Image (cartoon, grey):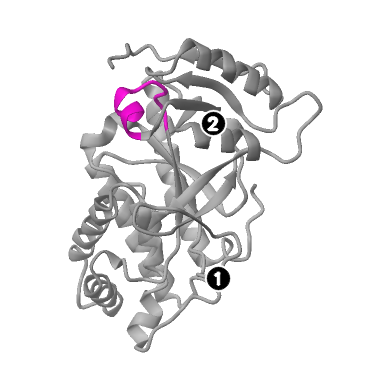
């Protein structure tokens, strides 16, 4: 997991890791200070998702532009522009960063493909049942392992922290451009020298902005699996599923190690909570299914929230 690919060893990958590491470390430290360590992360899903995860030992990560709330990304970009306003526009690098960021609102026109899968530190929340399905799959956070292309990161709801992290990102982008290091091998460029220099670095904004949410959603306590670097359109791992208005890109992200000791699970699933509308028969059938998938020790229980039909 720690062996980085060529892309993630680039300046792009280095900046990504430094900012994301800071976000993760701060979140875990604050959780420990509250005596509320994040041991289990829950993925709410419907029946098809449950069956697919148990069969493939993976979750589907969806293209970032197909997320339920498109305003999440705009929220992060608006803070980034606020950060840029605080820097000296006479510095050609800061000026260039501002020009590129403002010429394309939310940078949605960029040739960027990032993929996201969502989890929550809360396994039995009514708003999540209403929005995402009847099954909450609880995974042991420290045993969740991914390929080098993906990271597991907590979302940030505190506006002050969001600004601090984007200041860190902006400064690292500025410094990377200043020393002339290429952000990523093969990064697409555009016609003007300014765009050619700055545009690939602003890919990083896409990734970090996906972790910032309005404080009004803080009860979700969301964590996300996100791709570490953007994929090109011809990446072989991009697949498509049916969407509401057309095909939606996604990719599969393996959740466990492919090499496990005898008697150990290769899927770090610890618990399944059944939503309020599930029957007692569903609980029994699920236990049979888990035994069939060599997961007989996974805890199964009903939601504590009363069902109101």
Q: Are marks 2 and 1 in contact (CB under 8 Å)?
A: no
The C terminus - image quarter: top left
Q: Is mark 1 on a helix, strand or loop?
A: loop
Viewer-nearest residue: 259 or 165: 259
Q: Is residue 122 part of the magenta span, yes or no?
A: yes
Q: Which circle, 2 or 1, is nearer the viewer?
A: 1
> 303 above or below 97?
above
Q: In x, y percent, where is residue 300?
A: 54, 15
- In the rendered image of this protein, does residue 286 appear above or below residue 222? above
Earlier in the chain: of badge 2 and badge 1, it is: 2
Q: Give the range drawn in magenta.
A: 120-131
In the rendered view, would you say 282 is above or below 189? Answer: above
Is 5 placed left or right of 66 in the picture?
right
Of residues 128 and 87, which is closer to you in this image? 128
Left/right of residue 30 with respect to residue 77 in the rendered view: right
Q: Residues within 10 Å of mark 1 (few under 14, many from 20)?
A: few
Task: Give the SS element for disc 2.
Answer: helix
Q: Distance between the residues labelled 2 and 1?
A: 31 Å
Q: Residue 6: x, y in percent?
A: 62, 65
Image side of residue 68 versus residue 13, left or right: left
Q: Residue at x 20, y 74 (%)?
A: 89
Q: Identify the residue shown where x is 63% and y is 56%.
A: 4
User: Residue 200's quadrant in the figure?
Assistant: bottom left
Which numbered circle lies on residue 141? Answer: 2
Nearest to the observer: residue 163 or residue 213: 213
Q: Where is residue 272 in the image (x, y as percent from the top left)?
A: 52, 21
Percent coordinates x, y for residue 34 in the rendering: 36, 21
Residue 83 part of the magenta segment: no
Query: Tag on residue 176?
Result: none
Task: Give the residue pinned by disc 1.
Answer: 234
Q: How crowded is mark 2: few (under 14 residues within 10 Å), some or many (20 or more)?
A: some
């Amino acid at each position: 997991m720690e062996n980085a690919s060529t892309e993630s060893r680039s300046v792009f990958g280095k900046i990504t890791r430094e900012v994301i590491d800071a976000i993760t470390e701060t979140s875990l430290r604050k959780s420990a200070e509250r005596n509320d360590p994040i041991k289990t992360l829950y993925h709410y899903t419907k029946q098809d998702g449950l069956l697919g995860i148990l069969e493939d030992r993976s979750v589907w990560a969806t293209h970032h532009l197909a997320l339920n709330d498109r305003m999440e990304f705009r929220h992060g970009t608006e803070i980034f522009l606020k950060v840029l306003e605080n820097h000296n526009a006479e510095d050609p690098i800061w000026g260039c960063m501002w020009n590129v960021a403002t010429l394309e609102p939310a940078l949605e026109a960029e040739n960027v493909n990032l993929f996201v899968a969502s989890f929550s530190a809360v396994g039995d929340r009514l708003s999540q049942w209403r929005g995402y399905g009847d099954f909450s799959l609880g995974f042991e956070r420290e045993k969740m392992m991914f390929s080098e292309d993906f990271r597991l990161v907590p979302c940030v709801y505190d506006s002050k922290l969001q600004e601090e992290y984007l200041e860190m990102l902006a400064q690292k982008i500025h410094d990377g451009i200043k020393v002339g290091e290429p952000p990523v091998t093969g990064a697409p460029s555009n016609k003007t020298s300014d765009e050619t220099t700055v545009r690939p670095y602003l890919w990083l904004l896409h990734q970090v902005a996906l972790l910032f949410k309005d404080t009004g959603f803080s009860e979700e306590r969301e964590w996300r699996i996100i791709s570490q670097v953007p994929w090109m359109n011809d990446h072989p791992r991009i697949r498509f599923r049916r969407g509401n208005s057309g095909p939606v890109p996604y990719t599969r992200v393996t959740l466990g190690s492919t090499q496990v000791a005898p008697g150990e699970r290769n899927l770090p699933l610890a618990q399944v909570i059944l939503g309020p509308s599930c029957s007692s028969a569903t609980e029994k059938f699920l236990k049979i299914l888990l035994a069939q998938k060599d997961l007989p020790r996974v805890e199964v229980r009903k939601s504590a929230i009363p069902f109101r039909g």
